[in-house]
Image (cartoon, rainbow, N blue to C red):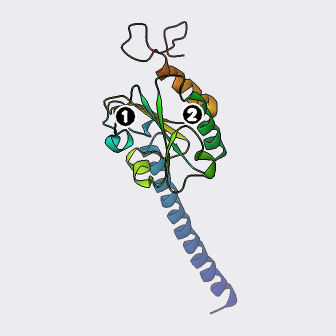
Amino acid sequence: MSFQTSALILSWIAILLLALVVSGLVRQVHALSSGMVQRRPESVGLPAGTPAPGFAGLAPVPPAGPLVLLFLDPDCGTCAQVLAEAADRVGRGGLEFRVLYRDDAPARAAGLPVTVLAGQAELFDRYDAVATPFATVVDRSGRVLRAEPLGSRAALRRLLDEFDSPSPDGLGPAVATDRQGGRA
């Protein structure tokens, strides 16, 4: 066998191996992308109307108004801002707060006027709190009103304002609308 024949055979073997590697990578990319499409951002958290898991343990005495569950992480800067906003809102309205941490709560949460619960990894999973900070608002009867990730202190403020303001007919939270009648 000549050198040229050997080089040609080795080249074809290398091309075949490259084709197999590329096809494997294409399959992995396809599997990852189809996995990302299955879960849309709006599907996080429990849907409105769902019974709140562990509600009796979170609120042994039925709250006077909506209960706001804040799922936070001690190492998250935005979580610290959200916690400060919740502490500022205590006593100003009919909302009650429970601050939940997956593992240990930070020392700064100990002196605040909110109920802080550490070691709540199970509730993080049951409430589908996939990112922190995350808020779930539960009504007095233990049904989820809203669940959403929070990106800032202002996002929590907007959420709290919505549930802290009674509607004109007194039946539920007011919802602000824009000039075209859509949600503001």
Compared with residue 164, is residue 152 higher up or lower down, i.e. above or below?
A: below
Q: Quadrant location of the C terminus?
A: top right
Q: Nearer the viewer, residue 71 or 110?
A: 110
Q: Nearer the viewer, residue 113 or 82?
A: 113
Residue 76 percent coordinates (x, y): 63, 48
Residue 78: quarter of image: top right
Q: Quadrant location of the N terminus?
A: bottom right
Residue behind mark 2 = 86
| Residue beneath the point at 48% across and 59% down | 27
- Marked residue nearer the N-terminal end (1 or 2): 1
- Foreground mark, 1 or 2, reads 2
Please tell me how crowded label 2 is: few (under 14), some (14-19), or many (20+) other residues with Cα within 10 Å: many
Residue 172 percent coordinates (x, y): 39, 17
| Residue beneath the point at 58% across and 70% down | 18
152 lies left or right of 31: right
112 lies left or right of 68: right
Residue 25 percent coordinates (x, y): 54, 62
Q: Which residue reaches farthest right?
A: 3
In the rendered structure, find residue 15 and report the number of the disc placed on it: none
| Residue beneath the point at 44% across and 49% down | 124
What's under tag 2, amino acid-wise? Answer: Ala
Compared with residue 11, is residue 67 higher up or lower down, i.e. above or below?
A: above
184 lies left or right of 66: right
Compared with residue 20, is residue 138 higher up or lower down, i.e. above or below?
A: above
What's under tag 1, amino acid-wise? Answer: Pro
Compared with residue 37, is residue 20 higher up or lower down, i.e. above or below?
A: below
Q: Is residue 53 among what the camera can see? A: no
Q: Is residue 169 among what the camera can see? A: yes
Residue behind mark 1 = 47
Q: Nearer the viewer, residue 135 or 42?
A: 135
